[in-house]
Image (cartoon, helix red, strand yellow):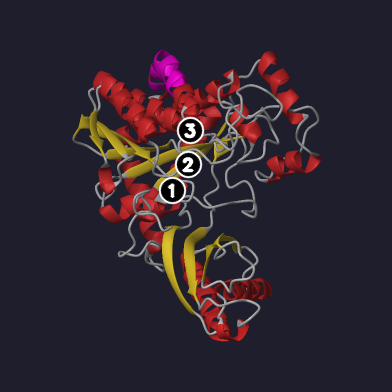
Amino acid sequence: MQNSDAVWEIVERKRAAFFELSDRIWDIPETNYLEHQSAEEHAGMLEREGFRVERGIAGLPTAVMGEAGEGGPVIAILGEFDALPGLSQEAGIAEQRPLVDGGNGHGCGHNMLGAGSMLAAAAVKDFLAESGLMGRVRYYGCPAEEGGSSKGFMVRAGVFDDVDIAISWHPAAFAGVNNPISLACNEINFHFSGRASHASATPHLGRSALDAVELMNVGVNYMREHMPSTARIHYAITDAGGGAPNVVQARATVRYLVRARTLPELLSLVARVKKIAEGAALMTETTVRSDIVSGDANLVGNTPLEECMFAHLQRLGPPVFDDADRETARRFQQTFNAEDIAASYGRFALTPKEDQPLCEEIFPLNAGDGTLVGSTDVGTVSWVVPTVQMRGATYAVGTPGHSWQLVAQGKLPAAHKGTEHAAKVMASTAADLISNSELIEAAKADHRARLERTPFVNPIPDDVDPPLPEKADA
């Protein structure tokens, strides 16, 4: 804790350049494994800050890493910069107004996530130089979190093997230490092959791959009654076999996203979904093959790290917003419904308040019951490295995730203030870890104890290649 003030002052000195980085990334929203401009922006910023930079790590063209310092423990700070499709939106406007029809947008705030994480890493770099402490800080710029699972491929490639501790954050409506609950997941394509035929003259000669997809979907929907209540399954037909109804479709593909609370639950559920696919093929006299596109493990918590980060949050307090920030947030709240706002509070087990447009408090440790969660490839990192995350308050209470409203708020002063706040907490947490080898050892002991009964299985098999654009399945 004695390092907090020094590293926070460094964050304040550097913040303006990283707000500009966040805004530049907002301006060039790029999706899974296509983040070439964004990755180069991050690599260039790392070089200007004096980091030793590697591009294309783990065989991923848009993954970057910067390291600074010498010897000692290695602290990784994880960043992201990928956007989402179909969420183009004008900045700062509380009405839906796309900049480009059907264009991309930063609907999960990854423009802030990457810039804030790098700001923290840059502050730790300068702290190490000024204090003379031995230690290394690394910034990992990770692409394709939104369905591409880059960190899982990076884990498989061994880029975290010599890391002692990993730190990250995510933009949110409230600030606090992330309750380490997420859903393990696999994204899987099921390709059905049948036999084309004239749908009227000779339907008996055809075998419909689209029928097989529909039967699979029915089977999975019936399975929902008989799976853990915390599991989730979603699907999208990505190839319906053509647009001619008078042709029996000889091919069809459905993509499934299977989620479960734990890795063992996920593996069991995936096996059941595959059996249903085989049954659908049997019923329709078609064939089916499947291929895993991506996969994330569930988060593994770490009590010593969470308590350390929470202590820094309590000392720093919540982000400081002004009346102009709150008035802008109120305008966005007028575009939400009551359920949006209730869910925002409920996710962190907070009591709803009247006229609270922005975060005013630090939510408690282990807040929330884990029912309102998704998946993250940070989970895979947390199985191989003791990991801690925080939530940083950067947008109006009630803002739906993956929405145009979130995109619109990504360049506001409140977004910058929340990004700085998160960077300060991550940087001071990292500085304390570098200064306190006993804390690192306690975190590692906690990590070993959690994995004793459940060994790590990467949900991305060794024979699965990253879904890079030139290798993507059609």
The three-letter amino acid code for the residue at tag 3 is Pro
x, y percent for residue 223: 64, 75
User: Which picture quadrant has residue 276?
Assistant: bottom right
Dot 1: what SS?
A: helix
The three-letter amino acid code for the residue at tag 2 is Gln
The residues tagged by marks 3 and 1 sit, at their Cα atoms, a distance apart of: 21 Å
Q: Please determine whether, in this image, residue 32 is positioned above or below residue 312.
A: below
The residues tagged by marks 1 and 2 sit, at their Cα atoms, a distance apart of: 9 Å
The three-letter amino acid code for the residue at tag 1 is Val
> Which quarter of the rendering shows the N terminus?
top left
Instruction: Answer whether labels 2 and 3 touch (C-beta < 8 Å).
Output: no
List the residue tagged with mark 1. Answer: 378
List the residue tagged with mark 2. Answer: 389
| Residue range (magenta) | 7-21
Label 2 environment density (alpha carbons within 10 Å; few <14, some 14–19, many ≥20):
many
List the residue tagged with mark 3. Answer: 29
Q: Say which of 370 and 141 sits in front.
A: 141
160 in the magenta segment: no
20 in the magenta segment: yes
x, y percent for residue 30: 45, 36
User: Between tags 2 and 3, which lies in front?
Assistant: 3
Mark 3 or 1, nearer chain start: 3
Say whether residue 2 is visible.
no
x, y percent for residue 162: 24, 47
Label 1 environment density (alpha carbons within 10 Å; few <14, some 14–19, many ≥20):
many
